[in-house]
Amino acid sequence: MDRGNHRHRTVPARLLAGLRALPPVTPGSTDAQWLGEHNLRPLAGGRNNRVYAWSSPDGPVCIKLYKVDERRRAHREWHALTLLAEHAVEGAPFPLWIDPEPAQPAIGMTFLPGTSIPDIADKGNALRGMAQTLKP
């Protein structure tokens, strides 16, 4: 399942504890300063989840902290990411680690730059491109 040289496989427990302690961050707040000091920036498009780009010492990582409810979002996304990685699906993030902390689970995955589909003007073309990417 190891696609490429993804060395950052250890859960960054102290970093996650800091993120979990923060309220949603607004630009210019002292929390935004804490994020900058830890090489983090909030990402849009997480809906009910909190998503960050992290410039880790081992390369860019996407950290996602999940809302907890009956849908078990972190568990389901982790299984989807590992399945995609096992089948070497290109264009999907590679799973690095999971922290199943009960109050707010988190997943670390490779960072793929791009734009959230809801933010794209031509959603039809974006959806066709996603279908093509996931085509066997």
Image (cartoon, rainbow, N blue to C red):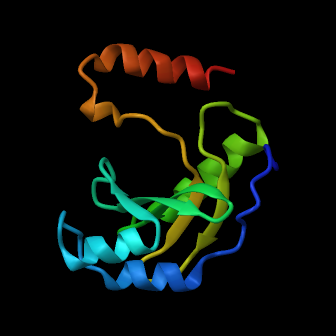
Q: Say whether residue 61 is left or right of residue 67.
A: right
Q: Is residue 116 left or right of residue 12?
A: left
Which x, y percent locates residue 127? 40, 21
Tell me where residue 48 appears, x and y as whole percent. Answer: 28, 60
Q: Is residue 59 above or below residue 113?
A: below
| Residue 84 can be seen, yes or no | yes
What residue lies at 68% left-to-right and 41% top-to-bottom? 84
Let me know if residue 75 appears in the view: no
Is 112 in front, or is 38?
Answer: 38
**In the image, is 126 to the left or to the right of 92?**
left
Q: Looking at the rendering, in which quadrant would you find the C terminus?
A: top right
Tell me how many marks there are: 0
Nearer-the-camera pick, 80 or 94: 94
Counting from the top left corner in percent of width and height, residue 88 is at 76, 35
Residue at 27% from the left image edge and 70% from the top image edge: 32
The x, y position of residue 106, in whole percent, is: 50, 70
Answer above or below: position of 8 versus 100. above
In the image, 118 versus 111, the foreground residue is 111
Residue 29 position (above or below residue 114): below
Judge left or right: residue 25 versus residue 83.
left
Residue 82 versus residue 90 in the image, above or below: below
For residue 28, what is the image quadrant? bottom left
Residue drawn 50% across the image and 79% down it: 15
